[in-house]
Amino acid sequence: MSRFLVGDDLGNIKTLRYSPKLTEESKISVKTVYKYDVSSGACSVQRLASSRGAGHTTLAAAFSNGTCLLSSLKDDDSFEVLSKWDEIRSANGRFIGLSLYESSVFTCTSNGMLRKTNFDLEGDTTMAGISRSECSILPSRLFDWKLSEDAHTFAYGGDEVDLSVWNTEGAFQEPPAPTSTTSSKKRKRNEDLLPGEIWRARNVPNDHLGLRQPIRITALSYLSSSSPSHNLITGTQFGDIRCYDTRAARRPVSNWAGIGKVGGIKCIEKGMSEHELFIGDGGSNLYSIDLRTGSILYGYKGLSGSITSIAPSPTIMASTALDRYARVHSVVPPPAVAGSHMEQKGLLLKKMYLISVPTTIVWDKWEKSTTINEESSEEENEDDEVWDTMENIS
């Protein structure tokens, strides 16, 4: 059994459970664990992030009214709010990044407000309080922000903001005082890195007419867990997917055009298998991509709304869409040899109508396999008893 966490446009947080061992009617179930107080105004969940502890999940949520919430979710779906705080930002800003690492919550808004909020947990779920908060100012007009798995670096991109990688610790340090030395040579525009910035991509070459191509990064993700600071991938408003290796070059090492068929790339997530990538565009397309060739391995059928969020897990993948459905899909790893034929393709396993529009979904890294193991062991014991009671004929 797998559990996912879903946020909607009404500010509610729900759990979605899927178990392939149950009947068709009860395979998927949804339960509201946090209900937003609508008397304080309209609000939607913009980002969710989770980390797994002993017997519980620590969950962070960012809302459209600037409120951030830290909570504890136990395995029985009991929900406890640990702390709340407000993000000081402009009225036009929105949360485009949220991440949990150890005892810190990282939030980033579209206008470049990056905040690191430290908290203390006494025992498993008792909140001691917010201990310290640090801020850093990034460029504005951002569309996506991601923290690496080891939290040593983070990356962002946006409208005329090319992919940039920063050292996390350096981003929150005081910038050095400007020197008074003058140079007769003019510095090239946007060539100097900002304090804390360790790498910045260059735009792709001009098109066949010699015109500069606009920078429209709408989604990004880290790729490799073995070298999390070097391999990244971005999706653009024009439907292109670009792979970067910060050790090789500033321009993308691979540029696959037109992968997103309608409305550009809206969400992008690295799969659990090697060379596996999932993307959703502005239409109703959800694809599995081979990172070796950039080709579409298969697409999921039965979708009638634009994908809002993707949450891969080791066995299945969940997605949410604007048609108010949450869906559970099967996943098929890419073939061992790039470009070879695939006998199987991912399928839609189950879907659930959520009444409200789901805005984001995450896998909380919780899977219950004891029930399945117990059932299989019981079946094996029954089979053994049948054979033991049979008469042995020589």
Image (cartoon, rainbow, N blue to C red):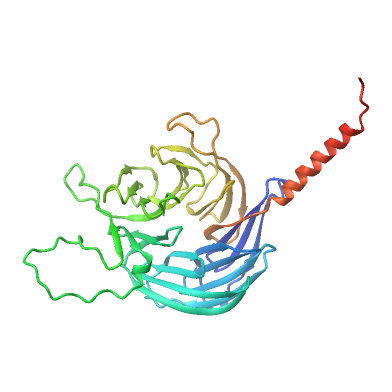
Describe residue 257's horizontal placement relative to residue 343 as left or right.
left
Residue 112, visible in the rendered structure: no
Based on the displayed image, in which of its 4 quarters is residue 120 positioned?
A: bottom right
Instruction: Tell me where residue 211 appears, x and y as whole percent.
Output: 18, 48
Instruction: Tell me where residue 22 appears, x and y as whole percent.
Output: 73, 47
Q: Residue at x 92, y 21 (%)?
A: 393
How many marks do you count on the picture? 0
Q: Quadrant of the C terminus?
A: top right
Describe residue 384's horizontal placement relative to residue 255 as left or right.
right
Question: Of 391 and 205, which appears nearest the observer?
Answer: 391
Q: Is residue 267 above or below residue 192?
A: above
The furthest residue to the front: 394
Instruction: Tell me where residue 271 appears, x and y as whole percent.
Output: 49, 47
Q: Is residue 180 above or below residue 145?
A: below
The furthest residue to the left: 184
Instruction: Tell me where residue 314 appears, x and y as whole percent.
Output: 57, 47
Question: Of 77 and 171, which appears nearest the observer?
Answer: 171
Describe residue 219's horizontal placement relative to residue 247 as left or right.
right
Q: Residue at x 61, y 69 (%)?
A: 72
Q: Residue at x 30, y 44 (%)?
A: 253
Based on the displayed image, in which of its 4 quarters is residue 109 positioned?
A: bottom left
Residue 304, visible in the rendered structure: yes
